[in-house]
Amino acid sequence: MTAASPVSLGGLRAEATALLRIGGPLMATQVVQMAMGFFDTLMMGRVGPTELAAVAIGAGLWHTLFLFALGILMALSPAVAQLHGAGQRTAIAPLVRQALWLAALLGVLCFVALRQLETLLTALGIEPAIVPIVGDYLRALSWGMLPIFACMALRLFSEGIGRTRPILLISLLGLLINIAANYALIFGHWGFPALGALGCGIATAIGMWTMLAGMLAILLRDGRYRSYGLFRRWTRPRWRELRPLVALGLPIGIGLFLETAIFATVALLLGTLGAVAAAAHQIALNVAAMTFMIPLGLSMATTVRVGHALGGGDLGAARLSGFTGIGLCGVFMAVMAVLILTGHYAIARFYTDDPVVATVAAGLLQLAALFQISDGLQVGALGALRGLQDTRAPMLIVLVAYWLIAFPLAWLLGIHWALGPTGPWIGLIAGLTTAAILLNARFWRLSARPARRNPAHPDRV
């Protein structure tokens, strides 16, 4: 395997261009997916506060479950990328077929789980008027689990070979269908009954089926995909082939769950401090989530580029791809930090007319600006490490950063020492900064020491 070598400015520019060519559609896709949630919220807000709250609770539940399961499947992208980089095209189709079996299993498990969550909500003491509405929403949406996981498996295959523009087109199609179905089924237009939250769930499921149909149409019609022979034959599930994929993906799923859970837990901590603190937190978190979509897309592209280089046996190129991706994530988030710091109060006022909430939110936005760079660097490093098929150590780093540093500090500063909403955000800054430092150090170490890597166990060095 080729070791790292000095990098020229031209090499950096070429790598940045390649990353942006792959990452551009992925960044736009992340924004489109966030827009789906935005339009759900916007339309449900016109129905009434009870149904809006029900969909908000339901969305939080299914997103958490979905991200955990999706993380397991996300191992497909770096695995395909390495095979593609190594020129082993014939090995890709059998791997994707096995991944589709895994996607089917995950889809069925999520389908069953979502249909049981109403009982859990009752046990947790959620307001009785909301629980059956959440149940209707989740049961309707559950019918989209099988197609969305199948679609994600095909999307991850497409990512792995570096073809990302079709992914954006499919996401845009899903968004448009989702908006139209929401309009018809939530409000009762075009001859359909007004179903409220139930209609929102049905619309989401329709959007998921549409995206799968669109992805299949592209794969079957585009000769650049047909040459891989995905559907020329079929194979039964083989645990011997699935086990490495699950072993690589399970830590990704756990890491995503730990990250989602820390932000949900901090929201609960803020909720104990009153409505103003909770509302201000939601504003600041929404802004941070929007800025995060761009480095998240870049991180996915970094996984692909690192995987291609590693598959080709060039660790120097993998190192260049990784640190170029990390650098682009950091630079973008630095720009976002400056913009948020400059306009924090104006941003807060855009969200609310309440001067008290706006003032608190503006203060939290200043703190959000402080963790922008750390957030970009940590997600960029995660993408680079996934490209190396290194997932267990990053999962442990996330566990330490978020649950042994961020959460204790958030509770200590916000609740015990009564610093108010500022306290939990300081905890988040500490956790994200710790993750950024440790994850980047991990990538630096692995990409610089090829002789000590064990290809059978990527986490062991």
Image: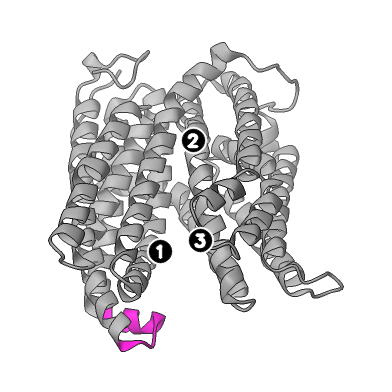
What residue is rendered at 25% in x and 82% in y? Answer: 359
Residue 432 belongs to the span the image colors magenta: no
Residue 442 x, y percent position in the rendering: 22, 32
Residue 290 bears which disc, if any?
Answer: 1
Residue bearing mark 2: 74
Type of amino acid under label 3: Met
Crowd rating for badge 2 (residues with CA inside 10 Å; few <14, some 14–19, many 20+):
many
Residue bearing mark 3: 34
Residue situated in front as seen by the camera: 141 or 103? 141
SS category of the residue bearing label 1: helix
Crowd rating for badge 1 (residues with CA inside 10 Å; few <14, some 14–19, many 20+):
few
SS category of the residue bearing label 2: loop
Q: Please, which residue is most extreme toward the left here?
A: 417
Say whether residue 52 is visible: yes
Report the quarter where the N terminus lies.
top left
Tell me whether circle 1 and circle 3 mark residues in contact (CB < 8 Å). Answer: yes
Type of amino acid under label 1: Met
Residue 237 x, y percent position in the rendering: 65, 17
Q: Is residue 309 above or below residue 31?
A: above
Badge 1 or badge 2: first in the primary sequence: 2
Report the quarter where the C terminus lies.
top left
What residue is rendered at 62% in x and 43% in y? Answer: 116
Residue 351 belongs to the span the image colors magenta: yes
Magenta highlight: main SS: helix
Name the quadrant containing residue 177.
Answer: bottom right
Asked which colour scheme the image uses, the reply is one colour
Residue situated in front as seen by the camera: 10 or 70? 70
Q: Is residue 240 left or right of residue 404?
A: right
Q: Which residues, given as a range, are shown in magenta?
A: 344-355
Q: Is residue 260 left or right of residue 334?
A: right
Q: Mark 1 and mark 2: span between their CA atoms?
A: 22 Å
